[in-house]
Image: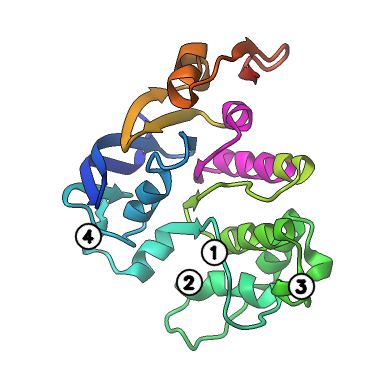
Amino acid sequence: MVKSVLKLENITFAYPGFTIKNINFDVPKGTFFGIIGPNGSGKTTLLSLIMKFIKPISGKIWVNSYDISKLSHKKIAQQIAYIAQDFNPAYDFTVEELVEMGGIARVSTFFETRIFEDELEAALRTVDLLEYRKRIFSTLSGGQQRRVLIARAIYQNTPIIIADELVNHLDLGQAVRVLDYLRKLTEDGKTIIGTFHDISLAAKYCDQIAVMKNGQIISIGSPQEILTEELIRTLYGINVKVISHPQDNYPLILI
């Protein structure tokens, strides 16, 4: 039986005018787990709950059998590398300085300056930014900045990577190369969890997909099981055609 690395039990949370209700799911080790849904459905809020940025009204979240309510943020950072949807540093850090920040959770004190040079270069090479390592982060394009954050998550070397809008701002070529790499990480036992707007990319790369609407998970399963024309119509209010990829058999959404 495959071990669950993330488990949510009866999670409820509320903002004024918005509620997440009774969220239950678990994510097996070594899987690529996607979350889709329209804007405002609760995807980012759900990730914030998992990272303990906010606390649920009720329910429990377990990460590798640890109750996150009892973990410090540093301990959580040793389990999960998190890529936020937006990131605007207050200072002019270089690319390599920002990637190195992913190693803070790996050292005993904040002031320890150990650099894992081989891993740093490998992470930057993965996102085609090794030659940009001395560039100031703010001078990069939005897509390049996103790739820096992905490199930082890789360098953090955690069993789980979570990303809000995983390939946001990336062109199709970069998105596919990054997702190919993350897919390979699952073969080594890492677990990837990401929210997606592009349903076809989620269908291609994810083992399982959770579908959110109005603060609830309305469906969960493999892409082939859940990505139907009826579900897309329920989520987005549009009629589409769903066909299977001719070689790889994952669902393709035709507008």
Q: In which quarter of the image is the N terminus?
A: top left
Q: Distance between the residues labelled 3 and 4?
A: 38 Å
Q: Residue 139 carries which label?
A: 3
Q: Position of residue 49 (x, y in %)?
A: 32, 53
Badge 1 is on which residue?
156
Q: Which mark is residue 106?
A: 2
Q: How far apart are marks 4 and 2 (CA)?
A: 21 Å
Q: Which mark is residue 69?
A: 4
Question: The disc labelled 4 sits on which kind of residue?
Answer: Ser
For residue 65: magenta? no
Q: Nearer the viewer, mark 3 or mark 1?
A: 3
Question: The disc labelled 1 sits on which kind of residue?
Answer: Gln
| Pointer 1 local density, CA inside 10 Å: few below 14, some 14–19, many at least 20 | many
Q: Where is residue 248 in the image (x, y as percent from the top left)?
A: 68, 17
Q: Nearer the viewer, mark 3 or mark 4?
A: 3
First along the sequence among labels 3 and 1: 3
**From the viewer's perspective, is residue 164 above or below residue 106?**
above
Q: Give the range drawn in magenta.
A: 177-205
Q: How far apart are marks 1 and 2 (CA)?
A: 7 Å
Q: Distance between the residues labelled 1 and 4?
A: 22 Å
